[in-house]
Amino acid sequence: KGQRNGGRVILGYWFDDYGQLGIEGEYFGLGKIDSHFIDGGDGTSPIVGRPYIDLTPGSPNLGLPAVEDVSFPGIMGTVAVDAESELKSGGIRLRRNLCCVGGCGPDCGDCVGCGSPVGCGSSILDEPFFPMFAHGSRHVDFIAGVRWMQLDENLRITEDLETTDQTTTFLLNDNFATSNEFFGGELGFIWEWRSRRWSLDVLSKLGLGNTRQRVSISGSTIRDLGTMDVTTKEGGLLTQTSNIGNYDRNVFAVIPELGVTLGYDITERLRFNVGYSFIYWSRVVRPGDQIDLDLNEEYLDFPTDPGYTPPGAPARPQFAFRDSDFWVQGLTLGFLYQY
């Protein structure tokens, strides 16, 4: 969650002089959002640790919450959490006018049957509940096209630790990266009202298609014993050889979008717009959902240590796809230029 800036560009072209058939291309992107958190201590105060569930065979705390110390008597250091998120989308669509009422061109089309089935004719909008829309012109357009959308996110956890006697240091990294790429078709409607300098547009559309979900998990631990004895192993705390790797799959997803835009014509060709839009994505993978808090502490051992034995069962943490939904809403300010 968070606020971010972004931009949207829409270019369109009508194939006729009366707005009966046209084509539109769209691209929007939300600026990358970065979040940073850090905490730690000198080994006395405060006490800081990273939680997990202990699944070490034979442990007296088997199945119970446990903590890896970051700041505790005997060890001092910091833990930092960095998160990144970026959303972008593009599409191209055909736009076909279904009806126009009031103020339309002479070749705009026959308005017979326009009111009841579509909702732009006098049979609906001339009712007292919509008195303001009884004036001016009203249009309903059908849109059909393709859409692409991508959500990239990353979560990185870094521990920088040192024993209080300053003989040993540890640098741990856990990294969880996710990418979601949607490609599919979309259908929808655009309802427009124009009266003098004012305009109101209402957009509703639905995208149906495939989302390619990708998850990348990596981690490492660097130990320095202070005597030129530096050792690196794969895996931090919640990233181990049991779940490190790259994973991907395809899932079906839907992306509905709703939008309302109020416009004011500054000149004959230039219009100022203010609006609201809401986009929902039914299935995405996000970094935090891919973290398994179950840990077999045998995976924390260094393979180069004397007497090392490979970890046994259970192989935890482990990876399993866990998806959730995603939504974004925003207020828009912009200009429309017609030529």
Image: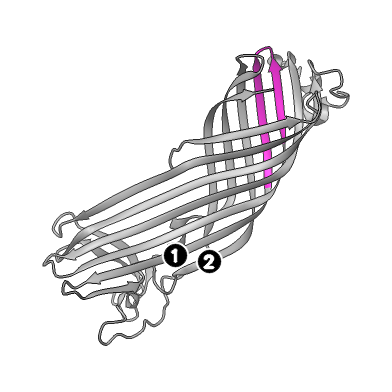
What is the magenta segment's predominant secondary structure?
A: strand
For the N terminus, which image quadrant? top left
Question: Is 102 covered by the magenta stretch?
Answer: no
**Residue at x-position 52% and y-position 56%:** 179
The disc labelled 1 sits on which kind of residue?
Ile
Q: Image quadrant of residue 94?
A: top right
**Residue at x-position 29% and y-position 82%:** 304
Secondary structure at badge 2 equals strand
Secondary structure at badge 1 equals strand
Report the side of 288 relative to 228 (left or right): right
Question: Is 202 covered by the magenta stretch?
Answer: yes
Report the side of 27 relative to 305 (left or right): right
Expressed as whole percent of the image width and height from the top left, the position of residue 146 reads: 70, 46
Crowding at mark 2 (Cα within 10 Å: few <14, some 14-19, many 20+): some
In the displayed structure, 147 sits above or below 50; it is above
Label number found at residue 247:
2
Visible in this render: residue 19?
yes
Question: Alpha carbon of mark 2 to alpha carbon of mark 1: how far?
Answer: 9 Å
Question: Circle 1 sits on which residue?
Answer: 217
**Residue at x-position 39% and y-position 71%:** 240
Expressed as whole percent of the image width and height from the top left, the position of residue 6 reads: 50, 36
Visible in this render: residue 130?
no
Q: Image quadrant of residue 103?
A: top right
Q: Which residues are magenta?
A: 189-207
Report the side of 157 relative to 93 (left or right): left
Question: Which callout, 2 or 1, points at the residue further toward the start of the chain?
Answer: 1
Front residue of 67/192: it is 192
Expressed as whole percent of the image width and height from the top left, the position of residue 162 reads: 18, 64
Q: Marks 2 and 1: CB-CB under 8 Å? A: yes
In the displayed structure, 4 sits above or below 99; it is below
